[in-house]
Image (spheres, coloured by chain):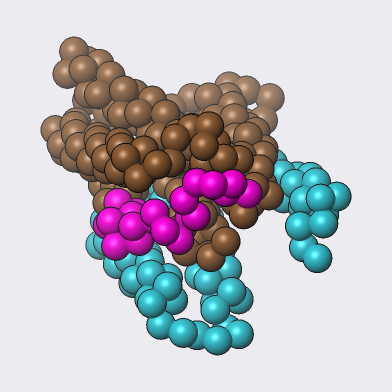
Chain colours: A brown, B cyan
């Protein structure tokens, strides 16, 4: 009886692997996925350093404008909402990819990229407005740490958009539906991470008064 | 078990579930923005921090599927996160940021 149960377990595992991709690794998990989570864990240290530097220098405005004088909270709130909704469209893309529905995967990924581009466009507009109000990169310690932090985040979003558009192109050439599901999932993890970093930036940098 | 049910439990939630999560996140964001305009008194900072943490955990758990995935991924990610919090809290304390 035990032999039969063990045999059944092996067959079930094999069926599961065939359905969701083989993971012949020492952990039994996808190395790509483990690598992505390790990368995201290390990214916490990068953004932690940038956020801490900003928190330390946000009051050092010199003769330049103060944060409360230049931040446009309604505008940034809309940008935050746009990025938050891009996380929804991304998770719908991942869901469609796991169902082997390439058409809807491409659709949701394209919408995610457009929402991301809207966010980056908003950031470019915001930076331009701040510069015109006298907040240059080297105006003060506040301005330098603010531009480095939000600029690094903006670069991450831009890299995410490039990855999204690349996978759309790759999937259009692919002849097997659902074959790129894991790649879409990896890009999705990166995109959601960029969103959670903005959740922290929006609260600590924009909403907490200096 | 249908294919869709199997897919939902294996890779997270149903699409309707994701939309509900997004609506909750949008509502919390609206509340966060409200704290900027409405005087919450001494509750301002704790409320803002709690809402930020709730949003973070919800996105990581549901949109990034950590709640449904292997626990090793949770350990790997939160180890990096808590290491970062510890290191930079110590660094900020060195500069008397909290005093």
Q: Is residue A72 left or right of residue B44?
A: left
**Which residue occupies the foreground of this view, A19 or A61?**
A61
* A108 horizontally vs B56: left or right: left
Q: Quadrant of the C terminus of chain B?
A: bottom right
At x 63%, y 34%, the residue is: A46
Q: Is residue A197 above or below residue A177?
A: below
Q: Residue furthest front?
A: A63
A96 versus B29 height, above or below = above
For residue A145: magenta?
Answer: no
Res A2 → quadrant: top right
Task: Please say if A114 is above or below B89.
Answer: above
Tell me the residue at 55%/86% (across/down): B41
Task: Provide residue A180's location: percent of width, then percent of height.
Answer: 32, 24
Place of residue A129 in the rendered image (x, y in percent of width and height, measured from the top left): 30, 43
> Where is residue A109 shown, x and y percent of the image?
24, 35
Q: Quadrant of the N terminus of chain B?
A: bottom left
Q: Position of residue B57 (x, y in %)?
A: 53, 59
Q: Nearer the viewer, residue A87 or A155?
A: A155
Is residue A127 something that shows in the picture?
no
- Residue at horizontal 50%, vertical 46%? A64
Q: Quadrant of residue A26?
A: top right
Task: Point out the residue furthest to the right here.
Answer: B94
Q: Which residues are magenta?
A: A60-81
Q: Which residue is located at x 53 percent, y 32 percent?
A: A138
């Amino acid at each position: 009886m035990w032999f039969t149960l063990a045999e059944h377990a092996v067959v079930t595992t094999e069926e599961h692997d065939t359905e969701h991709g083989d993971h012949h690794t020492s952990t039994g998990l996808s190395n790509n996925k483990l690598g992505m989570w390790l990368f995201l864990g290390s990214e916490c240290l990068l953004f932690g350093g940038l956020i801490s530097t900003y928190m330390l220098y946000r009051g050092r405005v010199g003769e330049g404008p103060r944060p409360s004088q230049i931040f446009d909270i309604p505008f940034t709130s809309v940008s935050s909402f746009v990025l938050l909704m891009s996380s929804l469209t991304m998770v719908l893309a991942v869901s469609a990819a796991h169902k082997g529905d390439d058409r809807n995967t491409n659709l949701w990924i394209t919408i995610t990229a457009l929402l991301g581009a809207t966010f980056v466009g908003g950031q470019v507009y915001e930076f331009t407005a701040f510069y015109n109000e006298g907040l240059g990169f080297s105006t003060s310690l506040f301005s330098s740490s603010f531009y480095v932090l939000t600029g690094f985040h903006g670069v991450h979003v831009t890299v995410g958009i490039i990855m999204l558009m690349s996978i759309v192109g790759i999937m259009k050439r692919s002849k097997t539906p659902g074959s790129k599901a894991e790649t879409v999932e990896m890009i999705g993890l990166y995109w959601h991470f960029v969103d959670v970093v903005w959740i922290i930036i929006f609260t600590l940098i924009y909403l907490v008064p200096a | 078990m249908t294919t869709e049910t199997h897919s939902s439990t294996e890779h997270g939630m149903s699409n309707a579930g994701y939309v509900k999560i997004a609506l909750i996140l949008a509502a919390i964001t609206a509340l966060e923005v409200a704290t900027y305009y409405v005087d919450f008194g001494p509750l301002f900072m704790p409320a803002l921090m709690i809402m930020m943490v709730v949003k973070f955990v919800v996105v990581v758990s549901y949109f990034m599927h950590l709640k449904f995935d292997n626990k090793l991924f949770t350990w790997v990610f939160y180890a990096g996160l808590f290491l970062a919090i510890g290191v930079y809290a110590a660094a900020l304390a060195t500069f008397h940021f909290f005093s």
